[in-house]
Amino acid sequence: MLYYCGMRYIVLLRGINISGRNKVSMEKLRNILSHEGYQDVKSYLNSGNIILSSDDEKKEIYKSIRRVLKENFDLDIEVMIIDKETLCAIMKHAPKWWNDGKDKYHNLIFILNGYNTEAIYEEIGMADNDIDQVMIYDNVIFWSFDLKRYQKSLWWKKTASKGLAEKLTIRNANTLLKIIEM
């Protein structure tokens, strides 16, 4: 049996398969990426989480996936690529409150290439500690919010607002834990 030992990458597609917009068949995308030479291509959920192995540099993977999305799905969307090792290191720095408690929803905000994490944090504004908890680590922001009062959250409103939402992609803790296992 032939074993492949390339770097494992997590590819997060921003804004696909939401309310009927930016439709991408994960099965079709997996097949195309496998045909492009990526190894052990998997997906999780229908929201743009791809896991693959490659010897290519992240910059080359980024260009390749953007091209595949444009040529096969007519989409010009942002793509976040992070190697599994880096994602695991980020998760080890999660604050104690993150992913703790069923009354809260836990997210990791990935800041897309070319944008500054601190500037994004300032653009969103101070968190209301009664509703939101946030912590910057490297180029991500750990964010948890009270499930019962999320509609009052400034962070909830701002992260979905036009002009800001395009600078980031968000995944919840459960999705990230599943992705790491793949």
Image: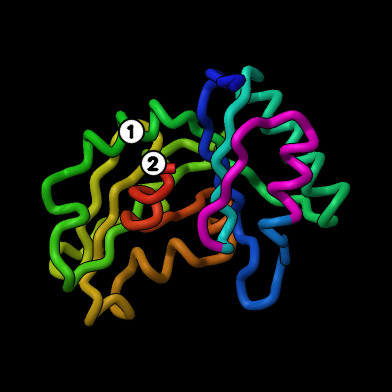
Tag 1: residue type? Cys
Residue at the disc numbered 1: 88
Tag 2: residue type? Ile
Q: Which mark is residue 159?
A: none
Give the left or right position of residue 94, taking residue 45 as reference. left
Residue 110, magenta (yes or no):
no
Secondary element type, mark 1: helix
- Viewer-side residue, 168 vs 90: 90
Give the left or right position of residue 157, taking residue 93 as reference. right
Residue at the disc numbered 2: 180
Give the residue drawn at x 75%, y 29%: 37
Secondary element type, mark 2: helix
- Viewer-side residue, 129 vs 79: 79
Label 1 with label 2: CB-CB less than 8 Å: yes
| Figure quadrant of residue 114 | top right
Split into 4 quadrants, where in the image is the N terminus? top right
- Viewer-side residue, 53 vs 156: 53
On screen, 120 above or below 26?
A: above
Q: Earlier in the sequence, mark 1 or mark 2?
A: 1
Mark 1 surroundings: few (<14), some (14-19) or many (≥20) residues within 10 A = few
The magenta span reads 28-45
On screen, 36 above or below 56?
A: below
Q: Decide if residue 122 is in sight here.
A: no
On screen, 156 above or below 97?
A: below
The x, y position of residue 108, in whole percent, is: 36, 50
Mark 2 surroundings: few (<14), some (14-19) or many (≥20) residues within 10 A = some
| Figure quadrant of residue 162 | bottom right
Split into 4 quadrants, where in the image is the C terminus? top left
The x, y position of residue 64, in whole percent, is: 76, 33
The x, y position of residue 59, in whole percent, is: 66, 24
Alpha-carbon span between mark 1 and mark 2: 7 Å
On screen, 116 above or below 121?
A: above
